[in-house]
């Protein structure tokens, strides 16, 4: 282990972080389990990338079969990309019919931003506080999670940040529907502020190209949006001629259980949907799906070429993932296990003052850790302690949210009812440990 750490220090940058105080040396994955070099198993409750299970045999088989036949780019006719585009768009509402394939969530949002700018002729963007949309030079500027964090360069003049619609800790608190218009008004104000901006950004006119949002907030702290929020926000955005981009990189592909896409839970249809992480079950695949109208604006003469995006292997993988989600009923499974687990976690709130809130949809759940139950005081130290102690019990979790006090639950969808029992029973014991009870009242 020390040798690996030393080599890492020597050849990798220190900005590349490891999880846990004593990092794990993971060498194998299977279903909802990861295995370390000693063969010890860990229940993976946080990896929403290996969506249908680590190393799912059908996905592995599809990738290796296609890898042995052909892997090239999109400049040749090939059935794979056509079949995949048809399947993917059949899962989306009208008029989201045109696909672009990329290699990551960052690339998907980067492309969505370019498309929005070309389509509207404007450059500005509104994002939600606490959001993360990727690591490139452009989309880092759409990510308050990063630009307002350590090493960040702060807000760019072409970006406006609307407050996070967090009904537990945010500016407006409540059960949902009644606070949605209050939060949506912040999006309206942000869009209008960009529109009325007197300065020019470089050679571009002022104004808003797009509203970027996740359909449930992930880095923001595992927050489902209040009922009716996106409907009102979209209306405000479209009233100014800007477009709505739903980032489904974390929450898409059936995770929320009741629907295939997170935005569907809000009854809206975005202009662009960006996808990543679960789409390839670990294979570097991403996608942007948009309307024919926006795709037409983007076809302005400049070729769009992505060397790896949409290659036959990636498309075979993407198709296999869709097949497995359907054949194994994973969306319905996420609903059933997710509801079961959320109810069990909610019952911990009465017993343990540290558990301030439990929220989520399907297998996308957040547990808010607080030192003061009534005052909702976030406590990142206790959240971290719980994550470390769960790891000692061979259960992998992590934290997020602006205060890093929200424990994230977003396992591969094969996670089952007895896994949920095991996680909740273990957490029940950890929450009763002295370190937690001394701090959390
Ligand atoms: N959007 C969201 C919501 C994300 O959570 C992430 C990654 N955490 C990204 C985009 C960027 O995806 P990638 O790391 O694949 O570039």
Image (cartoon, helix red, strand yellow):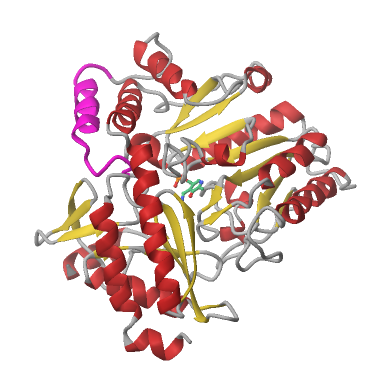
Q: Residue at x 28, y 77 (%)?
A: 429
Residue 394: name its quadrant.
Answer: bottom left
Q: Can you give x and y, in whole percent of width and height, for residue 308 in the image?
A: 39, 28
The stretch of residues the image draws in magenta is: 50-70
Position of residue 241 relative to residue 15, above or below, is: above
Q: Is residue 63 magenta?
A: yes
Q: Residue at x 53, y 80 (%)?
A: 373
Number of numbered discs present? 0
Q: Is residue 347 magenta?
A: no
Q: Can you give x and y, in whole percent of width and height, for residue 326 in the image?
A: 33, 29
Which is nearer the eye, 368 or 28?
368
Residue 398: name its quadrant.
Answer: bottom left
Answer left or right for 98 relative to 230: left
Position of residue 67 relative to residue 148, above or below, is: above
Quadrant in the picture for the N terminus: bottom left
Q: Can you give x and y, in whole percent of width and height, for residue 46 in the image?
A: 35, 56
Answer left or right for 126 relative to 266: right
């Amino acid at each position: 282990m020390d040798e690996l750490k030393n080599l890492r220090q020597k050849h990798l940058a220190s900005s590349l972080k490891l999880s846990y105080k004593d990092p794990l040396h993971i060498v194998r994955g299977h279903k909802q389990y990861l295995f370390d070099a000693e063969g010890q198993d860990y229940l993976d409750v946080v990896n929403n990338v290996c969506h249908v299970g680590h190393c799912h045999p059908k996905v592995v088989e599809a990738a290796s079969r296609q890898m042995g036949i052909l892997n090239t780019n999109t400049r040749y006719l090939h059935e794979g990309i056509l079949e995949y585009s048809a399947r993917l768009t059949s899962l989306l509402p009208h008029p989201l019919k045109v696909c672009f394939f990329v290699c990551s969530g960052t690339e998907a949002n980067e492309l969505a931003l370019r498309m929005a700018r070309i389509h509207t002729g404007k450059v500005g963007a509104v994002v939600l506080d606490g959001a993360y949309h990727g690591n490139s030079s452009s989309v880092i500027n759409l990510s308050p999670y990063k630009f307002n964090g350590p090493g960040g360069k702060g807000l760019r003049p072409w970006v406006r940040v609307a407050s996070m619609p967090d009904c537990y800790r945010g500016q407006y608190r409540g059960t949902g529907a009644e606070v949605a218009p209050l939060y949506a008004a912040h999006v309206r104000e942000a869009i209008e502020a960009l529109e009325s901006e007197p300065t020019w950004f470089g050679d571009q006119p002022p104004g808003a190209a797009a509203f970027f949002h996740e359909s449930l907030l992930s880095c923001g702290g595992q927050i489902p949006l209040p009922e009716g929020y996106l409907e009102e926000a979209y209306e405000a955005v479209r009233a100014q001629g800007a477009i709505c981009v739903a980032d489904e990189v974390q929450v898409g592909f059936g995770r929320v259980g009741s629907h295939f896409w997170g935005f569907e839970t809000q009854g809206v249809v975005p202009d662009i949907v960006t996808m990543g992480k679960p789409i390839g079950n670990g294979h570097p695949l991403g996608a942007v799906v948009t309307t024919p109208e926006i795709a037409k604006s983007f076809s302005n003469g400049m070729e769009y070429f992505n060397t790896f995006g949409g290659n036959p292997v990636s498309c075979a993988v993407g198709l296999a993932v869709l097949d497995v989600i359907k054949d194994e009923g994973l969306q319905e499974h996420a609903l059933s296990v997710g509801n079961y687990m959320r109810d069990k976690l909610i019952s911990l709130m009465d017993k343990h003052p540290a558990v301030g809130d439990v929220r989520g949809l399907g297998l996308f759940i957040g547990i808010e850790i607080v030192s003061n139950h009534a005052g909702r005081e976030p406590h990142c130290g206790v959240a971290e302690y719980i994550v470390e102690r769960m790891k000692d019990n061979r259960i992998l979790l992590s934290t997020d949210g602006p205060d890093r006090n929200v424990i994230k639950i977003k396992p591969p969808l094969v996670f089952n009812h007895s896994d949920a029992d095991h996680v909740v029973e273990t957490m029940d014991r950890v929450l009763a440990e002295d370190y937690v009870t001394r701090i959390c009242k």
